[in-house]
Amino acid sequence: MKKNRMALLAVLATGMFAVTACASPSQSAAAPMVKKASAPVTITWSSGTVTGTGLRKTMIQLFEKENPGIKVQILQQPTNTDTTRATLSTQISGGSTSPDVFMGDVIWPGQFGSQHLALPLNKYLPKSFFSRFAPGLVDGASYQGNVYGAPWYADAGFLYYRKDLLQAAHLPVPTTWEQVQADSLKLVKMHKVKYGFVWEGSDYEGLTCDWMEYLSDAGGQVFNAKGQPVMDSSAAVKALSFMRGLITSGASPAAVTTFQEPQAMNAFDQGDAAFLRNWDYAWSNSQTPNQSRVVGKVGVVPLPTFAGQGGTGHACIGGWDIYINPHSKHIAQDLKFIEFITGYQAEYTMASKFSEIPTNYAVQSDPKVKDLNPVLAIVSKTHLVGRPSQTPYYAKVSQAIYTNINAALSGQVSVKSALAQANSQLKSAGSSSSL
Amino acid sequence: MSDPAAILSGGKGRKPPSPRESMSRRNVIVKKTIGYVVLVLMLLVIIAPFYWMVVTSFKGNLEISNIPPTLFPHHPILTQYEQAFGVYGFGVYFRNSIIVSVSATIVVILFASLASYAIARLPIRGKAPLMVGLLAISTFPQVAVISPLFILLERLGWLNSYQALIIPYVAFNLPFAIWVMRTYFVGIPKELDEAARVDGANLFTTIFRVILPLATPGLFTGGVFTFVACWTEFFFALTFNNDTAFRTIPVGIALFSGQFTIPYGTIFAGSTVAVAPIVILVLIFQKWVVAGLTAGAVKG
Amino acid sequence: MAASTDCLIKGMEGETCMRVSKLDRQYAMAGYIMMAPALLVIALVTIFPIGYSIWMSLNTIQSTFTGFSFTFSGLTNYAIVFANQQFWQALEFTVFYAIVTVAVELVLGLLVALALNQPIRGRGVAVAVMLIPWTLITVISAQMWAYIYNGIYGVLNYLLMQLHIIGAPVLWLGTAGLATFAMMVADIWKTTPFVTMILLAGLQLIPEDLYEAAKIDGASVWKRFWHVTFPLLRPSLGLATLFRILQAFGLFDLPFVLTGGGPGTSTTSIAMLAYRAIFNDGDYGPGTAVAVTTVGIVIILALASLKALRTQVGEVES
């Protein structure tokens, strides 16, 4: 009996081997070299889920209507930026012609540009193309004078607050960080809410975003004009001391050092936090009944700054760009796709139907768009600050920042030694001969 | 019969009670019950986190991040499962994972049992370096290998196919399977081979009629590990098989997450369903867990 | 016959003691043929990528439009790696992690294997249940544990507070030493079934007669374990130790999902360093050097642990 079972397995194995080797269509078989002018070209677009409500499908439908000779096929990617970057760099550095275009993080131009993983768009598109974008975005997508990404949708940090709690405690909406801290403590002491201010303090890229906001508000920078790291400046000390102070004073729960966006959002959605620093998605998330217990109780304003600075605080630039694979066989069609998807019609649809912040400046400043939801209304009031991503070593730079800031926030090291350590790591991060 | 003392020393306690023991039958029953209770407690501890995963898959999003957490769903729903299968097309991933994992496992068991027998029993040269070499291949981190492997598969035109995964899985799981089965074969007494040969059996018959049926625990272990390794592998599946038609379960579940959202409910729903085939396979092949070695095959 | 009895149970080297003869040469031929399919597949698929990786570690690599550009640089990458403080930190953490988790898993795995070795009804179900942690996708298991350990809505804190074991929620993943401990618990939970399966299979090899003989000789429970079970289980223990060490050095998913390598860098493993170097920084040279170094270290540790188990005192009672 056993012998028969063995023999059967052997036959099955051989059979399956043969079947799978022959049956699966080879996706990379060479397409016919001669293309008839009327045959539609299909380009592949590697992208992750944006809103989960059909944004990309809509964009593709609109594009294909305008460009009947071109079809767009989505290659689904996970939305984790590190995982996607790993897959894309493996595929493109391996010479793959697919995907033709891909959705990439705003911090990739340095790495992708220097490793020839993206096409320099400025060599293929006229200068006038780039003037359609809101100021600062094109610089963020550039590396050494070449523009690698076309900004698709933008994102920034905002301060979300509980309208009902502030009203009940007769507190005005805070305009300085110090007020945020004081209000948090007050509300927690009054037992009106469990936690005061939640934000992202975990050991990851998001912490670099939060850090840039406090650092810029304190008047500091990561690199000075000469490109030297200045993370041990007094501004940096002020910023980090304040962040650590939020935890030690009890304004923020100690758990924020383990929070990424989902955890901070959850705390706020459950009604257990008075203030939240998060991206623009937090608005629609907090107003969705099956996700949130605080529907109708939320307000949003630009991030505050430190007392004495005046105006609104800095918000870190986020969002995603569209890049072209330099090995793509359909560059002309890829360029058409980029031109369309960053054009007025597509960006307006994206803003109005899907509540994403448009990168197209005309759309951003359109009063109709501003009326659509509170986040879009205040976007233009925010002072945007980018992360120091114009370097091929940005991953190391960011790591030097977030590992040390996180160490200080968890109380492992003092503020001063964390910043000194960060500074020395930033110095060595700039050279290619380091791990 | 479960005799805790026998359990601890490793025997199976199958000896019938001697006259002395039958005098304290109640004692025996108490010991037996203790044995069962210990096992059940162990299993409960092992299963507790998994229970939490399953329970979460039946909760709505709001209840999942509830403070304090609810140990049992207040409003159990099937929405997460509907999401996984309906919205995300989990069924396709399931089919692909089954095809890839079953194929790879069958091939590995076949090739590994032949190779392990040879290494364990036959007078071939260079066994030690071979085993160490296999170990070294097993050790090599996936992250270092994935780039050249991608290039290799691309040149062959095998990206986005079943063989893109089956063949690397077979290659990278064989070393461990060979190690497991060889360790097992070495433990089977040589007398059996010799006795079979004396009885006039050729090599083929010796292997398939005499040795392999006794080696089912080794085969089972190698098979289960290979299957689980293929079933849960993420990195290769993500990089080589981008296409939805060939996507496997681990990648599929990873795609449930949004940029800033981790939909625990849907993820756990997918994972709970993904556990089922392995449990079923284990139950089907459970006879293989036990060896026939002590069933009187060896005399003296 | 005497020669055969000596060869009854062998250690890790696996040398058979058949005397060379014409028949043996035929058997050897058969052996090579039987090994061929497996070795062929392995060689075809793994030799190129592994060789390529090792070659990469000896070069300075640039990613250009037409592919990678190689400039031979000998051991420069290794020098860079060994001079890097983060590497030693990660190595220290990984080694410590490997030793502790493997040791605990061997003990726990042995206990569970012994319990499952009983001819009880429903053993198949028990084995299936015991295997469940191992069958979960590593990343999903890590996410599940992140959810359990969460400092605000995690169920572990909730249960511990309900049982009055702690007064306030503990930040499992945000406190330096605790994060390591929490990760170890998650890892041990997930991978003990691996050890259990191997040991359970090994227990099947031990003939019942040996226990009977020992019992008749009046050996106590502990003596029976130490003198009958343990020595015969040595090969399986060795195998389990070997591959658990190997896997422990590949530790990646847990720190990646649970802590991101933090707080600070306290839970950054070697595999994370290799991943970051290759994918985040594009440093293929140093990254593959880390990978090759990992292989070297694991082989050394593996050979050492194999030797250690062989030299243990243990007699087979016949």
Image (cartoon, coloured by chain):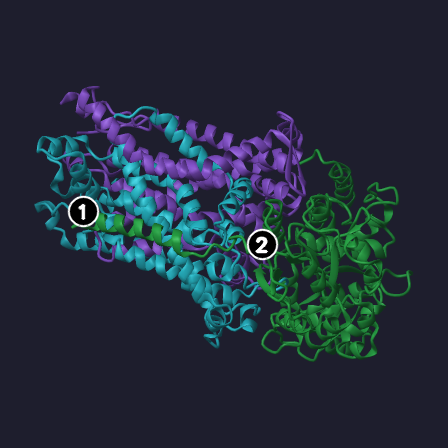
Vertical relation: C180 (above or below) C7: below
The residue located at (62%, 43%) in the rendering is C276
Image quadrant where one finds the C terminus of chain C: top left
How many marks overall?
Answer: 2
> Which chain has been coloured cyan in this picture?
B
Amino acid type at circle 1 is Lys
Image quadrant where one finds the N terminus of chain C: top left
The residue located at (19%, 21%) in the rendering is C22
Label 2 sits on residue: A33
Helix, strand or loop at disc 1?
helix
> Which chain has been coloured green in this picture?
A
- The alpha-carbon separation of the residues under discs 1 and 2 comes to 52 Å
> Which chain has been coloured purple in this picture?
C
The percent position of residue C171, horizontal first and vertical second, equals: 60, 55
Answer with mark 1 or mark 2, whichever residue precedes in sequence.
Answer: 1
Q: Chain of mark 2?
A: A
Vertical relation: A343 (above or below) B195: below
Nearest to the observer: residue B160 or residue C6: B160
Label 1 sits on residue: A3
Amino acid type at circle 2 is Met
Q: Chain of mark 1?
A: A
